């Protein structure tokens, strides 16, 4: 590490990094429903204004879940250097998922114990957000004469799809490649790993139809559940083996996700379930409706049209063979897979910084599920984007979630060296 001035600036901020992470954890930004979004944006705004950033608070008016009771607030802060150059943007989501059971620590206490900070969102991803702020502030202090700009954003609703956060900002032009050239999302992928992108998603609901009749004379009706049984049988017999045979060159972790996958999220058929305090018997009826929800994750080598056709062709085949089979299919949601090129500038730069700081080769991974990169890629048309940040992904959404202070410090060094490489003219320290 040659940039001693920069590394000293990082080292001097250890206590500040801890305090900032704790401060963020202590604002419970639970989603759903989306609590305290304005409070966390104002907390960050005060901090970043004091560090010389120009700050905007942006409400995602009209986005899904935005309401006067639970407004979707986002923060975008920009610091400009002394000369024109590229803009490096760090994007973190400020929302956290529900607490759940099994905690031994206060989920919103931000307690520091044995080098770990505990709390809901510690690793996913308030630790990463704090790390990027410390890295930027240290870089600006060491190199106030840099070229270009640094942006920090804290955005809403990543945990529920990102429509009131990054998607909204991308629609407003905040991720236009004319404005921002490099994006780092400090999700908890571990300090030595670069996440290049994610697999695709297709959700669909299939409904089979029948005819209601008395349960003692089922031959007078037509059971939608039996029709769905035929669908499930075909999924087992035909679809699962087909998907298991598809492999990707994407470095997805865990390795089981390097094939196409399908989860049947739910199944509902026949009479609605009664309240738990209902003490009577069910009524005897033939089910006239049955529904399943499919969660299909697909690979960059697959085409969404082909993914849909596999399912609709299967259903048509059943219709051709099975008397009285009728169905509907409704698409609920889809996301294209994305993977940033390994030679993209932000990838090469962060890779070199990891190798300098940690003296170990950087690893490249792809996420099995999606995150906000999807909106930056698709709406923003900005493809020079990765996820890189401190924390252990497996701890996300778990009880006693924590982030390690040493890991955050190392990641801050990597982020700060990345800023040096992208924003300092070649040859300067
Ligand atoms: Zn996250």
Image (tube, helix red, strand yellow):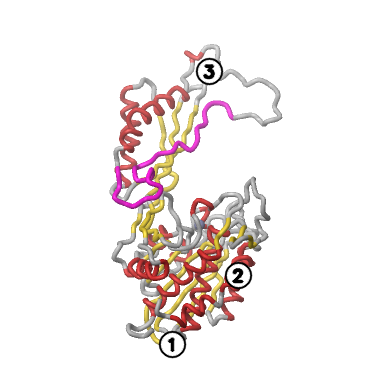
Q: Answer with mark 3 or mark 2, whichever residue precedes in sequence.
A: 2
Horizontally, is 56 left or right of 317 in the view?
right
Q: Please state the horizontal and vertical placement of residue 358, each as a whole percent of the image.
A: 42, 66
Spatial separation of the CA atoms under disc 3 and disc 2: 63 Å
Q: Answer with mark 2 or mark 1, whichever residue precedes in sequence.
A: 2
Q: Residue 411 bears which disc, if any? A: none
Q: Nearer the viewer, mark 3 or mark 2?
A: 2
Tag 3 near tag 1, CB within 8 Å: no
Residue picked out by circle 3: 213
Label 1: how many Cα within 10 Å (few below 14, some 14–19, many 20+): some
Spatial separation of the CA atoms under disc 2 and disc 1: 26 Å
- Kindly identify the residue that appears in the image at 60 percent across and 68 percent down: 18
Tell me: residue 38, above or below residue 212.
Answer: below
Tell me: residue 266, above or below residue 414.
Answer: above
Q: Please state the horizontal and vertical placement of residue 31, each as a whole percent of the image.
A: 59, 54
Q: Please state the horizontal and vertical placement of residue 113, each as a whole percent of the image.
A: 63, 60
Label 2: how many Cα within 10 Å (few below 14, some 14–19, many 20+): many
Secondary structure at badge 2 equals helix
Residue picked out by circle 2: 20
Q: Nearer the viewer, residue 121 or 86?
A: 121
Q: The magenta stretch spans which residues?
A: 247-272
- Kindly identify the residue that appears in the image at 45 percent across and 22 percent down: 226
Label 3: how many Cα within 10 Å (few below 14, some 14–19, many 20+): some
Tell me: residue 54, above or below residue 69.
Answer: below
Image quadrant holding the N terminus, namely bottom left
Q: Nearer the viewer, mark 3 or mark 1?
A: 1
Spatial separation of the CA atoms under disc 3 and disc 1: 79 Å
Is residue 253 part of the magenta span, yes or no? yes
Q: Residue 145 bears which disc, if any? A: 1
């Amino acid at each position: 590490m040659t940039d001693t001035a920069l590394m000293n600036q990082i080292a001097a901020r250890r206590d500040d990094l801890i305090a900032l992470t704790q401060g963020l954890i202590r604002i419970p930004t639970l989603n759903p429903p989306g609590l305290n979004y304005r409070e966390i944006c104002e907390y960050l705004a005060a901090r970043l204004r004091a560090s010389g950033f120009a700050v905007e608070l942006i409400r995602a008016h009209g986005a899904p879940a935005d309401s006067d009771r639970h407004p979707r607030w986002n923060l975008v802060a920009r610091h400009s250097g002394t000369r024109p150059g590229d803009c490096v943007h760090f994007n973190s989501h400020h929302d956290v998922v529900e607490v759940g059971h099994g905690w031994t620590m206060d989920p919103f206490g931000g307690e520091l114990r044995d080098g770990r900070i505990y709390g809901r969102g510690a690793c996913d991803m308030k630790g990463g957000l704090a790390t990027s702020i410390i890295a930027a502030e240290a870089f600006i202090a060491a190199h106030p004469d840099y070229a270009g700009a640094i942006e920090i954003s804290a955005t809403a609703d990543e945990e529920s799809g990102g429509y009131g956060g990054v998607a909204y900002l991308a629609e407003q032009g905040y991720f236009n490649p004319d404005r921002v050239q490099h994006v780092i999302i400090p999700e908890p992928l571990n300090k030595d790993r670069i996440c290049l992108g994610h697999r695709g998603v297709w959700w669909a609901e299939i409904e089979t139809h029948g005819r209601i009749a008395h349960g003692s004379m089922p031959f007078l009706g037509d059971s939608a559940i039996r029709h769905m049984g035929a669908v499930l049988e075909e999924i087992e017999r035909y679809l699962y083996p087909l998907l298991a045979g598809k492999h990707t060159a994407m470095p997805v972790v865990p390795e089981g996700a390097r094939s196409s996958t399908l989860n049947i999220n739910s199944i509902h058929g026949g009479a609605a379930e009664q309240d738990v305090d209902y003490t009577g018997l069910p009524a005897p009826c033939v089910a006239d409706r049955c529904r399943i929800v499919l969660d299909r994750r697909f690979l960059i080598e697959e085409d969404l049209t082909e993914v849909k056709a596999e399912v609709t062709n299967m259903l048509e085949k059943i219709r051709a063979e099975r008397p009285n089979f009728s169905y509907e299919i409704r698409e609920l949601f889809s996301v294209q897979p994305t993977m940033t090129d390994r030679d993209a500038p932000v990838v090469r730069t962060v890779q070199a910084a990891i190798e300098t700081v940690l003296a170990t080769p950087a690893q490249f991974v792809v996420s099995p599920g999606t995150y906000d990169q999807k909106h930056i890629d698709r709406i923003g048309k900005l493809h020079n984007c990765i996820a890189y940040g401190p924390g252990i992904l497996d701890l996300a959404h778990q009880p006693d979630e924590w982030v390690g202070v040493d890991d955050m410090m190392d990641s801050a060094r990597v982020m700060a060296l990345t800023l040096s490489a992208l924003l300092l003219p070649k040859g300067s320290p």
